Amino acid sequence: MGLKRKTGAVAQGRLDHGAPIAVIDIGSNSVRMVAYEGLTRSPTPIFNEKALAGLGREVQTTGLLATDAIERALGALTRFRRLCRTIGVERTWAIATAACRDAKNGADFIAKAERICGARIDVLSGKREAELSAFGVIAGIHKPDGIVGDLGGGSLELTDVSGSGIKNGVTLPLGGLALQDLSASSMKKAEAIVAEALADVPLLTGGARRSFYAVGGTWRALSRLHMFQTGYPLNVMHGYVIPAREALEFARLVRRVDDPNTLSQIEVVTAQRRPLLAYAAIVLERLIRIVRPKDMVVSALGVREGLLYSLLSVKEQQRDGLLVAAQELNVLRSRSPRHGPELIDWTDRFMASTKIEETPEEKRLRHAACLLADIGWRAHPDYRGEQSLNIISHAAFVDIDHSGRAYLALAVFFRHVGLERDDLAPHLRELATARMIDRARVLGAALRVAYLVSAAMPGVLPKTPMVVERGKLKLELKGKHAPLAGDRLFARLRQVARLIGREPTFVTD
């Protein structure tokens, strides 16, 4: 399935979701354009660029967007319009947030920006911005439960989210640029401003022992700094979890440093964001003290993705974002896309027969692994496991935590290299529980049997089930499939049998 271009060439690495779409986000700190492959449950960016214009730099004290910031923003929008034409974007949604809604000259700026963009710009109310941030978390986190905090340059939006339900949010002028402006760059004044603003926010009292979902570039920068300082084994921000106590201690550390450039690993944070780290830390510290969450979870999805999610039908919103993304990779990279769903059914039957306990979450992860099991087939045989592991562990997946990523990557890794080799994946093993590693080994071993039986082609697995019956692990190879029986296949069947404590046997008549 490819995207046919006007030149007649076919891009085999693209899914045909129609013409690309784009979202332009005019924030208080940055102006960003993201072009997506299409409006789907798991939208894939095909181009992403931002410019740090700093529109909200002086709004709190002067009431105006600064002239130089306006020039930078309009220059970026001019470039974005050209890029959208180059990419072939047919529909663009444009939004603006706190700086533009608060500034006296905001309307004049928006009028100029609309002429450049060629699209209407929706200046979001604080309530709408909070809602879209919450939608972004719902789109990206599997069954979220807690408080969403979206920290931008001009404001902080707070919303309570549980599953797909959200409560009315609030917006506060606590963005990094706003705090810097209001406090005249005084940390003590900033602390007092934050303490007063958060002293009486009712929804925060409902966040105890739940998660706090951190949205926004500065909080991501703060979390990235924590990730690198602690030597975390996976460089993926979305779904990164910091226990509440640890997040509190790290926020204190960053807040107390006079010069952020002296912090260890500070180079992982862009120079433009470094001055705002202390303000983000002040807000985070106060929120953790008030909310008392169990952990802080980073969401790379926010207002932009929330906007796209809100445009989907209810049926599409209810689809599993991880399984959608896995199915798309299955279509793009496997030898036979139909084989993936057959693997799901084949392993469903196998797992049910073993009586091995499997939670709904473990089942959905197994289904995703089946869809991803063949995405590395084009690599050299010696590197298929390694390539698959790297693609899966670093893919732009949503609706999955880091432990789940480790399971998926390890299961497909084992499917290629066998169960004896795990030298290429020690860092991922740190993220998975012993139970998850065991499940990955069982699935990896089962997949090794399935691919030797089917040669990755559809139509075979439905007729060659592998199930436990009467204490034995039986692989059915009847009729025209009987010639598939052999020593190599039996060795793989025996490996599965050992893992589940059964005796292996072929059933050929």
Image: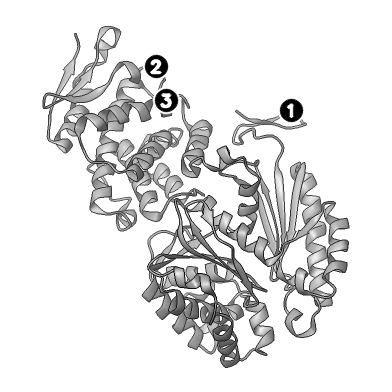
Quadrant that contains the N terminus:
top right
Q: State the separation of the CA atoms marked 3 and 1.
A: 30 Å
First along the sequence among labels 2 and 3: 3
The residue at which mark 2 appears reads as: 459
Residue 128: percent from left, percent from top: 67, 60
Is 382 rendered above or below residue 482?
A: below
Q: Is residue 264 visible?
A: no
Residue positioned 34% across, 20% down in the render: 461
For image coordinates 69% across by 34% down, the residue present is: 18
Examine the image and state in which quarter residue 363 appears. Answer: top left
Q: Residues within 10 Å of mark 2 (few under 14, many from 20)?
A: few
Marks 3 & 1, CB-CB < 8 Å contact: no
Q: Identify residue type, mark 3.
A: His
How far apart in space, not on screen, are marks 2 and 3 (Cα)?
8 Å
Q: Is residue 53 visible?
A: yes
Q: Which mark is residue 339?
A: 3
Q: Quadrant of residue 344?
A: top left
Is label 2 in a helix, a strand or a loop?
A: loop
Left or right of 37 on screen, residue 84: right
Q: Dot 1 surroundings within 10 Å: few (below 14), some, or many (20 or more)?
A: few
Q: Is label 3 or label 1 in front?
A: 3
Image coordinates of residue 8 in percent, x first then y, are 74, 27
Query: Nearer the N terminus, badge 2 or badge 1?
Result: 1
State the residue position of label 1: 8
168 w.r.t. 246: above or below: above
Q: Secondary structure at mark 1?
A: loop
Spot occupied by residue 419 in the image (x, y as percentages of width and height): 24, 41
Looking at the rendered structure, the secondary structure element under dot 3 is helix
